[in-house]
Image (cartoon, rainbow, N blue to C red):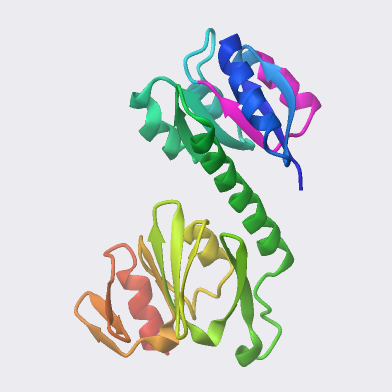
Amino acid sequence: MNIKCLIIDDEPLAQRVIEKYAQDIPFLEVVGKCNQAVEAIEFLHQQQIDLMFLDINMPKLSGIDFLKTMKHAPLVIITTAYAEYALEGYELDVVDYLMKPFGFDRFVKAVHKVQDVLSTRNYQDDAPVRSEMPPEEQFVFVKSGKKTFKVNLNDLLYVEALGDYVKIYTTERMIVSYQSLKHIESILTPAKFPRVHKSYLISLAKVEMIEGNQVRIKDKFIPIGSNYKMEFEKLVKAG
C-alpha cells in the first residue's frame, strides 16, 4: 500500500530533504508540496492524502494552529527546529515529532510508525469482534510490528496503555501494539471488558479478587481509578 504524502514547509531546503528521503522509501509517494499552511488547506480540498510532513513555524498560520482547524486531519509527522512545541503536538495526536536537522534513520523510524497505524486501522476494519459468535469463538486480530496475532477473547486478561501503544496481556503472551486504549475499548463489550483506570482495561471474567481500590488478575494488581469506580461496582453487583 502506497502512502500518499504532502510536505508543508516554508523552507525549500527542508522540502528537498524530506522529498529525497521519501524517494528512498518505496511505499512513500509525495503528491504535493506547500510553502504555507494556508496553501495546504486548498490542496487538501482537492486531493486526499494519508500523511502530512508539517512544519510548525510558518507565516500567516502555524502548523499547530493549522492542525487545530482540521476536523479530520491525515496522519501527521511534525518536522521542526522548535522542541518546545512537542507536547502540544502530541496532544493533537501527531504520529511523530522530528527535530531538524534529522537523519534518514530517524525519518525511517517515523514513517514506520505511520505504516503501523495505517495497517492497524485496516486490520481493525476487516476484523471486528465477532459478537454474533459463541463466546469461545470470539476473537480480534492485533497487529504488532510485522506480525498479526489472533487474540481469543476468552484468553484476554487485561490491556495496559503505554503512551502511543498498548500492552495486551493474554493467558499465553503479551503483545505490544501501536494503537490507543480507547480504540481497544471501542471494539470490546464494556460489560465484559470494562475500563477500570485511565491506563487499564480488564476482563471481568478473569478478576480473581477485589481489594479496596484494586483488582487482582493472576499476579497483577490493577488500580481502580476514582472516575471508573462507580461503574465498575455496578458491573460487579450485576454479575
Residue 186, image x, y percentages: 56, 64
Q: Which of 163 and 99 is in front in this view?
A: 99
Outermost residue toward the left in this view: 212
Horizontal side of 227 relative to 101 (left or right) equals left
**Number of marks in the image?**
0
Residue 101, image x, y percentages: 45, 22
At a point 53% along the width and 65% down the height, the residue shown is 184
In the rendered structure, does residue 132 fall within the stretch colored magenta? no
Residue 11, image x, y percentages: 56, 10
Q: In this view, does 92 lie above or below 123?
A: above
At a point 44% along the width and 88% down the height, the residue shown is 205
State whether residue 10 appears in this view. no
Q: In which quarter of the image is residue 188?
A: bottom right
Q: In this view, does 192 lie above or below 93?
A: below
State whether residue 147 appears in this view. yes
Horizontal side of 85 relative to 77 (left or right) equals left
Q: Nearer the viewer, residue 110 or 52?
A: 110
Q: In this view, does 16 lie above or below 154?
A: above
- Quarter of the picture containing the C terminus is bottom left
* Range of residues picked out in magenta: 39-55
Outermost residue toward the top in this view: 59
Q: Is residue 134 above or below residue 188?
A: below
Residue 168, image x, y percentages: 46, 71
At a point 70% along the width and 86% down the height, the residue shown is 133
Q: Which of 185 and 15 is in front in this view?
A: 15
At a point 43% along the width and 38% down the height, the residue shown is 90
